[in-house]
Each structure stands twice: as structure tokens, then as C-alpha cells.
Image (cartoon, helix red, strand yellow):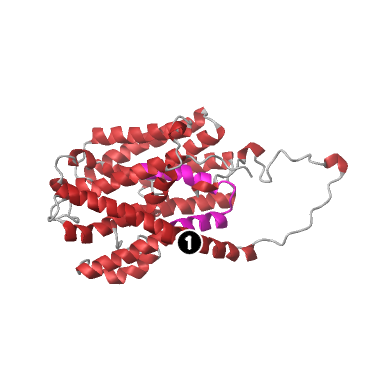
Amino acid sequence: MTRRERLRELDLLRFAAALAVVLYHFTGFGGAGAWPAPSQDVFPEIAPVTRFGYLGVDLFFVISGFVILMSAWGRGPGEFGISRLVRLMPAYWVSVLLGAAVYAVFRMGHGVPGLIVPNLTMLQGGLGLRNVDAVYWTLWVELHFYVLAAVLAGIGITYRSCLVFMAAWMLGGVFADEADNRILQVMLVPTWSCYFIAGMALYMIHRFGPTLLLWGYVAASYLIALRWGAWRAEHVFGGADETVVGAVITGIFAVMILVATGRLSRLRRRGMSVLGALTYPLYLVHSQLALPLLDAVYPGLDRWTALAVVIGTSLLAAYAVHRLVERPGAAWMRARLMASLKPMRPPEEAPTPVMGGDRGGRGGADLDGGESRDRAPVDAAHT
């Protein structure tokens, strides 16, 4: 199996999305936080820009659609599920326990101790329980996508099945909203699915080349994203300027189109893989570290220096989590979870000799009926 070159520009974009969320929480958020006053009041100079940092999540979801389809291609549902577990859980468990420690020390968060165990499962969103950290809501949305992707992997991932899957997901979400069907709305997450579908279509453009049909998926997803982006700007994020939100969403789609068509390949540098590795733990731990850090250094330090200390410490903590927890934890989990799949596999049979006239005669097609061009090498570096 030939490994493809790692798309390091995605590492850069993932880190930029995480940094946008960090700056939103630390300098652009209008509610209560780690600062004595709302962070947008502490930093009025940059808050008009950083208040839109929440849209980093939108970029995360497009990247997720791209990368998860790339990761799942050629895998069964079991292997795909294991790849997600080992990627998500070690750093997530550290984050939950860190949050519990912070809440215990600062005697805040009434009822939080009873939330620790459910939060360790990452299923608290479906159980109707609060998150130990507010940022976990995005993981619950991601989990919906992973379940649907596992179903697709169980069916068999081919060019054809992806087209059917994306159309069914997009139209099913629209129909669920039209019918106000709560069960389908929960399963299909129609307010966010457009980003994952766009990412999947863009990966297929990257893998197989552009076609009018694939561009149609991207265009439809973009229009739906504009609709929900405007709705969230008005109803969730305090009347944010819909024109700015639309412009940022347009920029997100534009930059991901550049990735899919290879026009950002010149940005690939080896150091970007480190940024990609920092992204997930940084997203998980930054808001939990802010409270004890700011309590210790602010207002003894001026606000800008205190901000630099919080961001710098968050980056160092993210790197420590990656090196000391994620890497060894993922290796330990992967070996044992893969071993647990062995009883599911049929025993290996001796190869049947091929008679001369039939030798290699069916080598051009996959067993599922798809053409062999549907099976390109999996880029394991992105799993």
C-alpha cells in the first residue's frame, strides 16, 4: 500500500480554527468566563473581530468531513470505530479530570462531581446531562457524524455509495426539519450536517477529481451553511452581524476548495504536523486552565501579558497531553481494541489455485461491484 503525502495544510487550518475558538473565549466572548468581566469588555480593541472566532467550529466540521472520509475509506466499521476511539478518548479523559480538579479547587459548578462519570463516556449530551466543559458540545455533534460514517463503512465505501449517502443525509435533514421530526433531527443533525457533507464532497474532489455533481454537493452545502449561520448569528450569538458571518463561512468554503484542488500544497511544511497534533488537546484544555491561571496572575499582570501567559500555558499543556497521554494512550488502546476484533474475522483459508485461462481475469473490479478506481490508498497519517 502506497502512502500519500500528508496534507499538512489541513494541520495548519485545524490549528487556526482552534486558535480562533481560544481567542473567542479569551477576548471575544460576551458572557461570564475566566476574566472578572466578560472577555469582550476586557479587550474592546480586538473583540469586534474575535467575537466571530466561534466560527472556527464551522471550519473544524468541514475539515472533519474531509479527513474522516479519508480515514474511513478502505476500512470496515470496526476498524473505523477503533481509529476514532484511540484518537479522541485519551486526551478527552484528561480534560474531564482536569475540569473536575479545577471545579473542586475553586468550589464552583454545583453538581459537577456527579457529572464526571457520565462525561467520561462522552455520552452526556444524549443522556440530558451538562458538559463538564462547554466545548464538549462539538464532540457530541461529531459523534453523530462518526456513527453515520460507521454505517457507511459497514455498507462499503465506494464512490457510488458516498454519493447516495451524502444525498440521503442532506435531503433527510431537510425533510426532518420540514416535518419537525425530533427523532430524525437528533439523528441527522441538520443544522450542522452541511459542513460534514461539504467536507466529504471536497475529499472526493481531491481524490477522484472535480465533477459537476460533486461541485453541486459543495454548492448546496454552502447555501445551507449560510442559512444556519445566519440563524445562529441572530439566535445564539447575540445578534452577530449576518454579513460578516456569511463572509467568514464563504472564506471557510473557499479555503477548503483550495485544499481539495491542491492549490495550498505549497504551504506544506514538516512543522505543521506539530500544530495539527496540538489542535485537539488545545481545544479541550484551554478554558479549564484559564480560571486558575488568571486567578494567579491577573490583575498583578496587565491584561495583555496575562492573556499571553494563558495562551502560552495552554499550548504547553496541549503539547504535554499529546506527548505524554495521546501518543502512548493511543498505542496501548489500539493494540488491545484491534485484538478484540479477531474473533469477528473468519479463519484464513488457503488460496484457491487459479486455472490458466482465468488468471487475473477479474482483477479490475472490487468485490462489492465498484470499479477499482474507487479504492485508492488510505492516508493513515490523518486518522
**Residue where numbered disc 1 is placed:** 328
Q: Residue at x 25, y 46 (%)?
A: 23
Residue 209 in view in this figure: yes
Residue 70 falls inside the magenta stretch: yes
Judge by depth and name the residue closer to the eye, 252 or 263. 263
Counting from the top left corner in percent of width and height, residue 81 is at 51, 57
Q: Callout 1 environment at 10 Å: few (<14), some (14 to 19), or many (20+)?
A: few
Question: Which of the image's four quarters has the N terminus?
Answer: top right
Residue extending furthest toward the right? 356
In the displayed structure image, the side of residue 143 where residue 83 appears, left or right: right
Residue extending furthest toward the top? 212
In magenta, the rendered stretch is 59-88
Q: Quadrant of residue 247?
A: top left
Q: Is residue 365 above or below residue 209?
A: below
Q: Quadrant of residue 326?
A: bottom left
- By secondary structure, the bulk of the magenta-drawn segment is best described as helix
Residue extending furthest toward the bottom? 114
What SS does tag 1 mark?
Answer: helix
Q: Residue at x 18, y 40 (%)?
A: 46
Judge by depth and name the residue closer to the eye, 35 or 218. 35
Counting from the top left corner in percent of width and height, residue 31 is at 18, 52
Q: Residue at x 18, y 49 (%)?
A: 305
Q: Residue at x 22, y 59 (%)?
A: 293
Q: Is residue 221 above or below residue 25?
A: above
Counting from the top left corner in percent of width and height, residue 196 is at 43, 43
Residue 206 falls inside the magenta stretch: no
Judge by depth and name the residue closer to the eye, 104 or 120. 104
In the displayed structure image, the side of residue 49 where residue 348 appears, left or right: right
Under mark 1, the amino acid is: Pro
Counting from the top left corner in percent of width and height, residue 363 is at 74, 40
Residue 129 in view in this figure: no
